[in-house]
C-alpha cells in the first residue's frame, strides 16, 4: 500500500484544512492502514490524486445515495480494501456485513466483467476469501445453487418475551402476549438453552391461559421454526468473526423485517460486549498483566438498507443497540459501524449527526437532501444541494464529508476487483467482449 503524503490531494470544495491533507478519517494517520477507495474528481470531472480512508481508528460511516448510484459497490470496495491490508493490521481487524439483498456472496469471484476498466486504474480482477453465512435452514437451498455457505443461527434463549411479541406483531398486554411473555420468561429463568418444542410445551402446560391463545402461540412458533434462523445453542461469535476474516451474513431469505432487526440487535450487542472485553484485556496488557487469550479483533460492521434497522419515526428491535452502543459509544471499544441507505430521510437523525464520515452518492429527493442538510456541519461552505449539483450524475461519484479534517471532497470511487453482485439486470445481451471475458472465468451455475 503506497504511503500517502500527497500535497495535491486537497479537497475540491475547500473547507478548513490544516497543512497537507493525507487520509480521510484520521489527520494523524502515519500512512499505514489505508483503504484506497478512489481518486479525487476535479470539477471538470478529470481524475485527480488518490483518496484513502483511515482503517487504524474505529469509524461511524454513513453511505447514502439514490437507487443504483453505488452504495453497495462502495461498501464492496471498502470490504476489499480491509481484506487487502498489510497482514499485521489485517489480523487485528474483521469485517462483517449484514447482506439484506443477497448480493455479496459474489465477492469470492474476480470481477472479470470490468477487466478493461480495472486496467485503466492499474488494477486486476481478484476474488476475495470470504465466508458466507446464511440462516441454517436455508443452507441446502444455497448449496443446490453451488454457493458455498455456512449455517448461522441465533440461540432461541437470546430473545426475551417482549422481543418475540415484536416479531409476531402481538400486543404484550393481549392474552396471547401475556401468555407468551410468561412462558419465555419462565424458561429463561431456568438458565439453560431451550428449543421451540420446550416453549410450546411450556405454553400448553400454562393453566392460566385459554386454549385459543395456546393454539395461536403454538402456530407462531412452528412458523418461526421453518425460517431456520433459530436453534437451541446458536452460532458462536468466534465462528462468525475472527481477525483478518471477511464475513457475509446473508439474511435476504428472511422476509420478516422484525426478525432481521432482532438478529442485528443480538449480533451488535454481542460484538460490542466482545470488544469491551478485548479493550479491558488490552489495557491490562499495557499495565503489564499477563493476558492469555487471543484478542477479539476490532470489527467493521457493515449494514445495508440501514433504514430498516434504525428508522426515523419509530424504533426497530435494533435501534437501541445500534444508536446507543455502536454509534454513540462504539469508538471507545473499537467497533466501526458502516450504514448504507437510499433514504436518509427515513433514518434516525442520530445516524447522520453521529457519523464521522458521510459518503454521499447522487441524491435527488428534497426530503433526503434536507435530512442531511439539517445536521450539516458548520464547516460546509455551500449547501449540500449545491455540492451534489456540481457532482453530477455519474455512478460511483461521491461527496465525502470528513468530520476529522472538517472538509468536503469530491471523489470517484474505484472499480471493484471482486465481482459486484448488485448490478441492475438488463434485457440486452452483454457486450460481446464482456461475454468472452465472462466465459473465460465462468461463474458456477
Ligand atoms: N464506483 C463505481 N464505478 C463504476 N461503476 C459503478 C460504481 N458504483 C456503482 N457503479 C455502477 O452502478 C451500479 C449500481 O451500483 P450499486 O449496486 O452499488 O447501487 P446501489 O446504490 O447499492 O443501489 P440500490 O439502492 O438499488 O441497492 C453497479 O452495478 C455499477 O454498474
Image: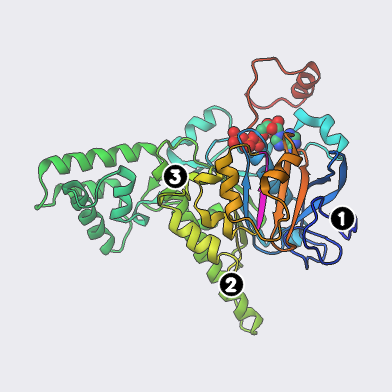
Quadrant placement of the N terminus: bottom right
Note whether 411 is above or below 145 in the view shown.
below
Label 3 vs label 1: CA separation? 39 Å
Q: Residue at x 16, y 48 (%)?
A: 175
Q: Is residue 313 left or right of residue 101?
A: left
Determine the quadrant in which ligand 1 lies. Answer: top right
Q: Residue at x 66, y 81 (%)?
A: 286
Q: Which mark is residue 279?
A: 2
Mainly helix, strand or loop, the magenta region?
strand
Query: Is 221 included in the stretch rendered in magenta?
Result: no
Residue 114 position within the rendered picture, expressed as x and y whole percent measured from the top left:
78, 30
Query: Is 361 included in the stretch rendered in magenta?
Result: yes
Of labels 2 and 3, earlier in sequence is 3
Disc 1 designates what residue?
Answer: 2
Quadrant placement of the C terminus: top right
Of labels 3 and 1, earlier in sequence is 1
- Residue at the far right: name it: 7
Q: Which mark is residue 260?
A: 3
- Residue at the far bottom: name it: 288
In which quarter of the view is residue 443 placed? top right
Answer few, some or many: residues within 10 Å of disc 3's Cα (few below 14, many 20 plus, some between 14 and 19).
many
- Check the image and tell me how it is coloured: rainbow
Label 2 vs label 1: CA separation? 30 Å
Q: Residue at x 72, y 34 (%)?
A: 393
Marks 2 and 3: which is nearer the front? 3
Ligand 1 within 8 Å, label 2 CB:
no
Amino acid at each position: 500500500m503506497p504511503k500517502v503524503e500527497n500535497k495535491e490531494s486537497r479537497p475540491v470544495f475547500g473547507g478548513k484544512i490544516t497543512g497537507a491533507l493525507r487520509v480521510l478519517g484520521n489527520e494523524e494517520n502515519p500512512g499505514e492502514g489505508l483503504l484506497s477507495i478512489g481518486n479525487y474528481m476535479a470539477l471538470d470531472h478529470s481524475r485527480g490524486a488518490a483518496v484513502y480512508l483511515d482503517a487504524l481508528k474505529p469509524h461511524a460511516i454513513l453511505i447514502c445515495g439514490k437507487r443504483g448510484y453505488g452504495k453497495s459497490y462502495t461498501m464492496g470496495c471498502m470490504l476489499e480494501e480491509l481484506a487487502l491490508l498489510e497482514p499485521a493490521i489485517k489480523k487485528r481487524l474483521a469485517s462483517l456485513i449484514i447482506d439484506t439483498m443477497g448480493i455479496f456472496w459474489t465477492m469470492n469471484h474476480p470481477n472479470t466483467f470490468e477487466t478493461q476498466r480495472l486496467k485503466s486504474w492499474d488494477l486486476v480482477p481478484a476474488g476475495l476469501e470470504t465466508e458466507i453465512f446464511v440462516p441454517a435452514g436455508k443452507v441446502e437451498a444455497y448449496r443446490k445453487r453451488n454457493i458455498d455457505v455456512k449455517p448461522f443461527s441465533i440461540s432461541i434463549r437470546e430473545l426475551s418475551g417482549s422481543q418475540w411479541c415484536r416479531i409476531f406483531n402481538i400486543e404484550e398486554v393481549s392474552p396471547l402476549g401475556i401468555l407468551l411473555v410468561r412462558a419465555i420468561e419462565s424458561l429463561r429463568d431456568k438458565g439453560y438453552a431451550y428449543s421451540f418444542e420446550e416453549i410450546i410445551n411450556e405454553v400448553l402446560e400454562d393453566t392460566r391461559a385459554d386454549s385459543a391463545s395456546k393454539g395461536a402461540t403454538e402456530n407462531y412458533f412452528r412458523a418461526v421454526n421453518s425460517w431456520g434462523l433459530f436453534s437451541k445453542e446458536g452460532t458462536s461469535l468466534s465462528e462468525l468473526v475472527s481477525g483478518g476474516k471477511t464475513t457475509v451474513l446473508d439474511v435476504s431469505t428472511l422476509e420478516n423485517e422484525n426478525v432481521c432487526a432482532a438478529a442485528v440487535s443480538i449480533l451488535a450487542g454481542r460484538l460490542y460486549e466482545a470488544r469491551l472485553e478485548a479493550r479491558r484485556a488490552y489495557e491490562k496488557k499495557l499495565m503489564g498483566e499477563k493476558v492469555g487469550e487471543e484478542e477479539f479483533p476490532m470489527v467493521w460492521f457493515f449494514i445495508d438498507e440501514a433504514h430498516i434497522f434504525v428508522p426515523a419515526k419509530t424504533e426497530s428491535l435494533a435501534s437501541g443497540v445500534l444508536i446507543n452502543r455502536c454509534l454513540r459509544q462504539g469508538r471507545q471499544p473499537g467497533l466501526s459501524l458502516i450504514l448504507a441507505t437510499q433514504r436518509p430521510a427515513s433514518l434516525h437523525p442520530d445516524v447522520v449527526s453521529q457519523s464521522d464520515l458521510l459518503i454521499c452518492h447522487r441524491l435527488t429527493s428534497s426530503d433526503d437532501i434536507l435530512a442531511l442538510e439539517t445536521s450539516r456541519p458548520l464547516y460546509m461552505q455551500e449547501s449540500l444541494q449545491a455540492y451534489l449539483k456540481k457532482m453530477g450524475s455519474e455512478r460511483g461519484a461521491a461527496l465525502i464529508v470528513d468530520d476529522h479534517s472538517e472538509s468536503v471532497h469530491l471523489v470517484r470511487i474505484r472499480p471493484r476487483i471482486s465481482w459486484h453482485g448488485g448490478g441492475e439486470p438488463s434485457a440486452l445481451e452483454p457486450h460481446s467482449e464482456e461475454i468472452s471475458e465472462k466465459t473465460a472465468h465462468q461463474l458456477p451455475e
